[in-house]
Image (cartoon, coloured by chain):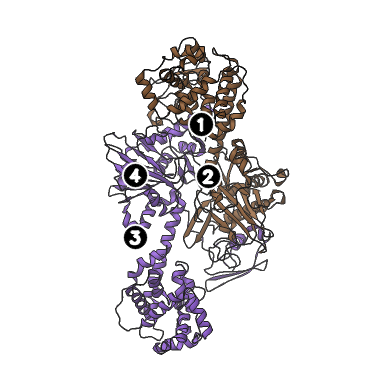
Chain colours: A brown, B purple
Amino acid sequence: MTTELPPYWLRDNCPCAECRDPRNGQKLFQITDLPDDLAIAAQAELEGHLEVLWSDGHRSRYPSGVPAREADGDGRTEADKRLWEAADFAGGLPEARWEAYLADPAEQAAVLAAVRRSGFAVLRGVPVRERQVLAVAETFGHVRVTNYGELFDVRVEPDPNNLAFTSAAITPHTDNPYRDPVPTLQLLHCLENSATGGDSGLVDGFRAAALLRAQAPEHFAVLTRTPVPFVFRDRGTELRADRPLIDVDPLGRIREVRFNNRSIATLRGPAAELEAFYAAYRAFAAITLRPELQLEFRLDPGDCLIFDNVRLMHARTAFAQDGRRHLQGCYADLDSLGSTLAVLHRRSAALDELAALFAGEGAGEYLGEAVTMAEHMLQAGALAEAAGAAPHLVAAALLHDVGHFFDQHGHGSLHGRDLMEGQDNRHSDTGAAWLARWFGPEVTGPIRLHVAAKRYLCAVEPDYRARLSEASEYTLQVQGGPMSGQDAAAFAAHPGAEDAVAVRRWDDQAKEAGAKTPDFDHFRPLLASLMR
Amino acid sequence: MTTELPPYWLRDNCPCAECRDPRNGQKLFQITDLPDDLAIAAQAELEGHLEVLWSDGHRSRYPSGVPAREADGDGRTEADKRLWEAADFAGGLPEARWEAYLADPAEQAAVLAAVRRSGFAVLRGVPVRERQVLAVAETFGHVRVTNYGELFDVRVEPDPNNLAFTSAAITPHTDNPYRDPVPTLQLLHCLENSATGGDSGLVDGFRAAALLRAQAPEHFAVLTRTPVPFVFRDRGTELRADRPLIDVDPLGRIREVRFNNRSIATLRGPAAELEAFYAAYRAFAAITLRPELQLEFRLDPGDCLIFDNVRLMHARTAFAQDGRRHLQGCYADLDSLGSTLAVLHRRSAALDELAALFAGEGAGEYLGEAVTMAEHMLQAGALAEAAGAAPHLVAAALLHDVGHFFDQHGHGSLHGRDLMEGQDNRHSDTGAAWLARWFGPEVTGPIRLHVAAKRYLCAVEPDYRARLSEASEYTLQVQGGPMSGQDAAAFAAHPGAEDAVAVRRWDDQAKEAGAKTPDFDHFRPLLASLMR
């Protein structure tokens, strides 16, 4: 059987360590390094692996057959969004309490996912203090500094350089269209809002654009193909970007919306094109004002609105000078938000994977002890926790034996049995390496050294070895026996020795049949916090 | 005569103060505020002005006839670039000394213009110290923070998460293609480079793309319409952006290039599309390696390379571990660089305009004194300078009478004659307002108050009035005569009173026929520094 896969595509995705850095997946060759006449010389499928011998002699092995394609889309076009009207939020806005958002990765993921999918979310109970908005942005990304500074104050100013800094009503618009790259996220943190009026409004610009496309495709086409000069000038600034009001990706999907009449400068072009543009622009603008698209709500002190500035249009009603209104805002970008969300999901999946170990193989395997592997590790974690140990030590105690479940390639296989059959499975190394995808050396270090710690303690504590369980005494031999005096001295001098010995002692104690412990879920928040 | 101009376009560009904020040019209405049946009811052209009466009753007056269109383009597409090959720089790179760049706005403008036009420039003699690269970026824009931090160190690292942090050769590429928005500028500041090898290379990606278009339009088309998944993953990061290798604007002009095989993930699509993409990609890659496109040079300590990361590809040769190589880099954006350059040009044009006043009307008009206006103002500036006054006071003294040259709308007319004909031209206000486009209140304040200062001094210094010139005594009457005691007390309490009185005294002394003074150009650097 020969595959129909394009050779350069297949070779560009060779997963071998020569072609791709195993740490970060970056390719280590250039596309021009491949010969002009590259071809598949031979190929075979073996147990789901695809093995390819190339015409230039290189060999590729694709473990899961044909390379997996990236999931469809980067999440930035209309295809990956939930387009909405105001009534879709009749049951409430996507929101979370600030404390829960900070404490619980699942809560944080839900907020960031809402910004990706619906274009916005509100955090409630954010501390009402100046510059706090910057701290909110740093929880998922990086602040984008502009000519307005690191942050900007939205309140009535005596000599405003922008309509935002007055008490006038502002119709739906996006910010900074005169920047390229435009800031893709905006945050607005309410510090004070006792004025009459001054409510906030959001419109889904993707929805409005999609409605325009359905209603008047010719208008939609004009807006996607007309670069509009957006300009902002003040004493120290002269920004200009020529971008279409509706930006589509190469496949025609809506990707970005810019909408701000305040800063549209004088278009050039033949009269007929100017006519067509203004007709389309006015039709689009009329859609953005449809009542069913206006999502209106009030920001109270402590609320922080996070929204997609290349999708949602934001607005505010006029307000009276009968009270004070003060928001602080800043800009950030969707790419870092998406990265933070993906890492949260990856970590959540990792915790699920660990939980499955405790529930699956771990719950059925004794490896010569009176308790299952899962009971043993939960007891170790519980002992560390009861001793008031630092979180990284609780985690290390809880996870110290996960290496028994994997071979050296990280592939699942109950590797611990090898050990019991007299072959050192080096499970401390295997476990530490497997966990290093998610945890830092403060967690993986004691795990890597927990077998060495046993051999160390046998050398330096006369009565330690006598207390070992039978299985542990057996594996001690396989693992090399007690350390020599020289090795023990070297171990003691290692900066991680103390943590490793602590974990080892909980390990040794954690073999009590029938002991009550918390379950794995109890440790999830602690593990999640260490994954940061 | 009726104009053929599209009504909505014309009305959207109404320059009246009701439609447009005179401070920043932002429009004060929404496009939807205009009625659906907007039409021109009547129009007339008068002395170059276009007057329009609209069907909704609004009146527009376009001072220079048809509204001027924005200059073509925002400077970001190939249309506004100088596409190059290496031989174009046989005479030297676009470069400047750091000190000259800081001291001379013209030098700074030349460097920034080179980055806009050619995609790069080199600053020489930048202080060799850590974090200095951030200070370089802040001279024209804002640092873009990424997962690599505020800045990154390019040197050999023990556990690199990126090929950049090894000693390997790196072929031409752009950075961070997995970000959207991608950082549009990169800076690399050389702190140490004593290793053999490690030279820098640049390739004009726009040139390469244009060559591909000429040679194989079908390949060019494929690369502009295929979103490529760029991915970067490490422990705390998971970035992805789907963008074409060659991004064109709606008019088909090359606008951005992304090129980095290291981070191209696995494309999806039918086999035929994958084949077509790889054929086009390899053809493009081959062009980027053509010897005539490789601009190679060496960065020495103190050199800082600034380059366009959505146009130029950068590379480096491998280097031996026989010496140390350490660069610090950071990212920034082209929009702020463009703004800084535009403001520098605007200020340079403003200085030319002021220079023309001193050379033109100012050199021919006496307004009742023994010296011309130009001589008078140059004497006042020189007296302030000789007295060791702060720069803002030298500038205020030099420019205190420019209001004589303008009417209240800032239009040129030798308005000073009105004053001599017994009508207060309020030249202190007019001049301060006109200058406020470029100078802050520390300069415009004393100018605004220099007539009030005369009226104040007449009230509080018994012998002051007697020393006034004949013309000044005459204008004192027109301007309201000496202040009352109450007004004088209020004036003295004004925080700007001291500066205004100082300028006033130089003004009074600056009427000596034939006195030698520096010319206007002498004051240009001082004025330029105050425009920041």
**Chain of the residue that carries numbered disc 4 in the rendered image:** B
Disc 3: CA contacts within 10 A as few (<14), some (14-19) or many (>=20): few
Q: For mark 1, give the secondary structure.
A: helix
Residue denoted by label 1: A392
Q: Is residue A356 above or below residue A92?
A: above
Chain label for disc 2: A
> Dividing the picture into quarters, in which one does residue A327 lie?
bottom right
Taking the view exactly as shown, the residue that stands out farthest to the front is A463
Q: Nearer the viewer, mark 4 or mark 3?
A: 3
Label at residue A138: 2
Pinpoint residue A291: horizontal percent, then vertical percent: 72, 51
Of marks 3 and 1, the one in the foreground: 1
Q: Please give the residue where the numbered disc 4 appears in the rendered image.
A: B85
Which of disc 3 and disc 4 is earlier in sequence? 4
Q: Residue under circle 3?
A: B103
Q: Nearer the viewer, mark 2 or mark 1?
A: 1
- Above/below status of B512 relative to B237: below
Give the Cα distance between marks 2 and 1. Answer: 24 Å
